[in-house]
Image (cartoon, grey):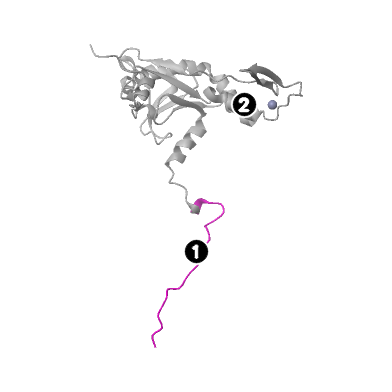
């Protein structure tokens, strides 16, 4: 029997970082309902508004999942991966920046002890959010984590976090985003140990921006840089 596969973290520590196989980034993964109606497979990952097929298939012969569901999540293959959910996994820092106006003399600001000092616990009527611990995805039916293991494990948990995501995404605009906001999941383009919950329009915009050619001075609002001084070529005088 062959040795069990390493976890994502072990593969990384061994200097053999597991990268996404390119299929995971072809998912159009919305957070609006059950798995069966929320995921589609894009023909082209670079075209989020282009043709797509349902991940869940229902025909007269029965139901099945899209064939990419059985593909490995990463190469080299891994037996598990622990996934950070952004911005939920690093929201404390952002919240503290958003409440820099807090004042120890203000009775509406509550501080609590933390590792020998005190930190802000409540401000503007909000409790400080806690960073979400990474979520663990295990290989379920094969020695390696498949696309299906990843989405079936994470989708229901992410749906349960929808409300938190709406309030954290709306934090900079002074309140929670409306309930009907369309949210999607975007897996990091290289490493499946990190994903973002985003508004759908923002996700589409981000994919488009990544494909734009690098900016040059032509795009600058200040206009082109001043032209270098002109020195006429030296022409020897011939008389
Ligand atoms: Zn505040």
**Residue 170 visible to the viewer:** no
Other residues around mark 2 within 10 Å, as few (<14) / some (14–19) / many (≥20):
many
Q: Is residue 231 magenta?
A: yes
Other residues around mark 1 within 10 Å, as few (<14) / some (14–19) / many (≥20):
few
The quarter of the rendering in which ligand 1 is drawn is top right
Residue 18 at x, y percent in the picture = 35, 26
Give the prevailing secondary structure in the magenta stretch. Answer: loop
Residue at image point 42% right, 41% down: 211
Mark linked to residue 86: none
The quarter in which the C terminus is drawn is bottom left
Residue at image point 40% right, 80% down: 236
Between residues 61 and 193, which one lies in front from this camera angle? 193
Disc 1: which residue: 228
Query: Mark 1 against mark 2, which lies toward the viewer?
Result: 1
Residue at image point 71% right, 27% down: 102
Residue at image point 44% right, 46% down: 214
Quarter of the image holding residue 125? top right
Residue at disc 2, secondary structure: helix
In the image, is residue 9 above or below residue 201? above
Mark linked to residue 95: 2
The residue at label 2 has a CB less than 8 Å from ligand 1: no
The residues colored magenta run 218-239
């Amino acid at each position: 029997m062959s040795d069990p596969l390493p976890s994502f973290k072990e593969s990384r520590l061994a200097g053999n970082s597991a990268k996404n196989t390119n299929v995971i980034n072809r998912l159009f993964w919305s957070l609006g309902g059950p798995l069966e109606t929320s995921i589609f497979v894009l023909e082209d990952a670079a075209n989020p508004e282009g043709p797509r097929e349902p991940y869940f298939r229902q025909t007269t012969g029965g139901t099945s999942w899209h064939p990419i569901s059985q593909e490995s999540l990463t190469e080299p293959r891994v037996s598990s991966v622990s996934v950070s959910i952004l911005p939920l996994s690093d929201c404390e820092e952002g919240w503290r920046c958003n409440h820099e106006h807090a004042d120890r003399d203000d009775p509406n600001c509550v501080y609590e002890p933390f590792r020998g000092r005190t930190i802000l616990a409540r401000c503007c009527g909000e409790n400080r959010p806690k960073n979400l611990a990474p979520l663990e995805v295990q290989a379920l039916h094969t020695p390696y984590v498949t696309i299906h293991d990843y989405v079936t494990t994470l989708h229901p948990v992410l749906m349960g976090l929808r409300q938190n995501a709406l309030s954290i995404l709306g934090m900079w605009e002074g309140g929670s985003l409306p309930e009907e906001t369309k949210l999607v999941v975007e897996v990091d383009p290289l490493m499946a140990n990190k994903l973002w919950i985003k508004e759908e329009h923002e996700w589409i915009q981000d994919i488009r921006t990544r494909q734009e050619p690098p900016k040059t001075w032509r795009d600058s609002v200040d206009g082109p840089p001043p032209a270098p001084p002109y020195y006429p070529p030296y022409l020897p005088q011939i008389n």
